[in-house]
Amino acid sequence: MDATQIRRIEEYQLSPTLQQEIAGLLGRAFPGYPSGQTYFQQLPSFRFLATRAQQLVGHLAVAHRMINAGGTPAFVFGVCDLCVDPLFQHQKIGSILLDALEEEAVRFPVDFIVLVATEPEFYATKGFIPFENPSRWVSIKDHKTVGLMQQPIPGGLLVKSLTGKKWGDGVVDLLGTMF
């Protein structure tokens, strides 16, 4: 078996070929994902890409931003579109991608890694804790702002604290789109 290689790349550095590869992977991993797109609502700041034998097998996009974490300003890495090609699942590629993100986060003033996910059990093994704060975010559809949403996120936010900063109990304002 080939070793998994992890590459960090800034969003603006994606070549057209790499954009096509990412769009293909996202389409295979997420049924109903916008066809040909490399992002759901908004471009991420950067990405981690996992390859084996030069084939893209895993992806993790990251939105680096300031949020209001229930009354506490916080620097976060918001995880977007973490996925592994269906042919390569259950080989720890998702864990390797999250580990790479955490290594990056501890080198900078990032207080929390935050995500919304449908598989909280996997993330719990990586130290993520669910929070059910009411949340506020900008909703975008077809490249247009359609509103400001405020409600609990179904399934809650999954949060991993990196600096010991306390996650507040109030409304979480994502100060932008959902991750």
Image: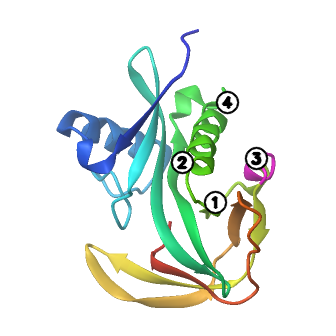
Q: Which residue is mark 2?
A: 82
Q: Compared to 138, does 44 lie above or below?
A: above
> Which of the two discs, 3 and 2, labels the residue nearer the N terminus?
2
| Residue contact at pointers 1 and 2, CB within 8 angstroms | yes
Of residues 143 and 102, the one nearer the viewer is: 102
Q: Tell me the SS state at disc 1.
A: loop
Q: CA distance from mark 4 to mark 3?
A: 12 Å
- Confirm whether the magenta stretch covers residue 125: yes
Q: CA distance from mark 3 to mark 2?
A: 14 Å
Q: Which residue is mark 4?
A: 92
Q: Which residue is mark 3?
A: 126
> Which of the two discs, 1 and 2, labels the residue nearer the N terminus?
2
Q: CA distance from mark 3 to mark 1?
A: 13 Å
Left or right placement of residue 173 versus residue 63 in this view: right
Of residues 151 and 105, the one nearer the viewer is: 105
Left or right placement of residue 147 versus residue 4 in this view: left
For the record, the magenta segment spans 122-127
Q: CA distance from mark 4 to mark 1?
A: 17 Å
- The nearer-to-camera label among 3 and 1 is 3
